[in-house]
């Protein structure tokens, strides 16, 4: 139980385009999902907390207009990186909470 | 702000030996702690957790110890196997806010 999926697993895009990443809880409902970013050989950095039916709460320094989060249902949250640039290239990981946090497999984004 | 940190960034052990990964935390109000394992290119995988009202919890081949007096958390892996090679993160939670430590890379030598 407590399986979280992400789609796509990797994406390559041109600078200036927008990329949407989906996070789904497959066998449970999650009122709260989290989005993290991880650079090579570093720890996970929390970007935002996504609550179903309400606006996401962003961490300090994370641009909410650049990283759009939508949590439309209890099993789906999406992160859209708008007008992506090479510095947005990273490993993006979501998690869903049911007592503890269970993580998705991550999405590797490469912006050329 | 307060943070979770690790004593050792890397740990190399012989296959079959026991491994101990340490973590120091600074928020004395944290009430829930988790150890995650992250293999290369994958998301973190839940290993074991412990609440602040406990000082020890055992799982399959893993044990987590919590010392609230010195704000220290450790993960013990018995009979370490090559498949245990990964980065291990501790995380502390307070008031629904979870923060990760820097991570320790465990390498198991055959």
Image (spheres, grey):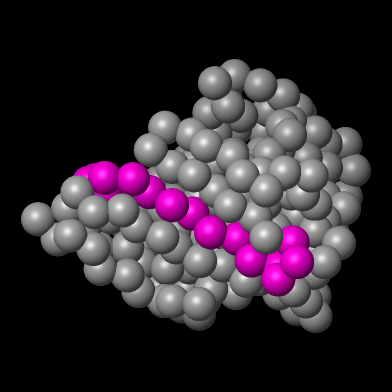
> How far from the left and from the top, in percent, is residue A82?
63, 64
> How far from the left and from the top, in percent, is residue A78?
65, 44
Which picture quadrant has residue A54?
top right
> How far from the left and from the top, in percent, is residue B6?
53, 73
Q: Which contiguous range is marked in magenta? A: B68-84
* Residue A23 at least partly seen: no
Which picture quadrant has residue A44?
bottom right
Front one among A31 and B96: B96
In the rendered view, would you say B103 is above or below B76?
below
* Quarter of the picture holding the N terminus of chain B: bottom right
Kindly identify the residue that appears in the image at 33 percent across and 45 percent down: B78
In the rendered view, would you say A81 is above or below A96?
below
Q: Is residue A76 left or right of residue A39?
A: right
Q: Is residue A6 magenta?
A: no
Pick out the residue farthest to the left. B110
* Residue B80 at least partly seen: yes
* Quarter of the picture holding the C terminus of chain B: bottom left
Kindly identify the residue that appears in the image at 75 percent across and 54 percent down: B93
Kindly identify the residue that appears in the image at 32 percent across and 70 percent down: B11
In the rendered view, would you say B96 is above or below B90?
above
Kindly identify the residue that appears in the image at 51 percent across and 66 percent down: B22
In the rendered view, would you say A1 is above or below B64?
above
């Amino acid at each position: 139980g407590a399986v979280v999926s992400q789609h796509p697993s990797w994406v390559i895009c041109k600078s200036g385009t927008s990329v949407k990443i989906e996070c789904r809880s497959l066998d449970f409902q999650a009122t709260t999902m989290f989005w993290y970013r991880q650079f090579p050989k570093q720890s996970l950095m929390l970007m935002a907390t996504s609550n179903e039916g309400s606006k996401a709460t962003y961490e300090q320094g994370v641009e909410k207009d650049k990283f759009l989060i939508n949590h439309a249902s209890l099993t789906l949250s999406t992160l859209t990186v708008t007008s992506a640039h090479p510095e947005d290239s990273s490993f993006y990981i979501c998690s869903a909470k049911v007592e503890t946090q269970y993580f998705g497999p991550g999405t590797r984004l490469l912006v050329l | 702000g307060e943070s979770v940190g690790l004593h050792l960034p890397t740990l190399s052990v012989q296959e079959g030996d026991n491994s101990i990964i340490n973590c120091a935390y600074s928020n004395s109000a944290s009430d829930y702690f988790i150890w995650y394992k992250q293999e290369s290119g994958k998301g973190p995988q839940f290993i074991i957790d412990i609440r602040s009202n406990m000082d020890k919890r055992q799982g399959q081949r893993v044990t987590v110890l919590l010392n609230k007096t010195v704000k220290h958390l450790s993960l013990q892996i018995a009979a370490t196997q090559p498949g245990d090679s990964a980065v291990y993160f501790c995380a502390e939670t307070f008031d629904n806010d979870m923060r990760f430590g820097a991570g320790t890379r465990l390498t198991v030598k055959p």
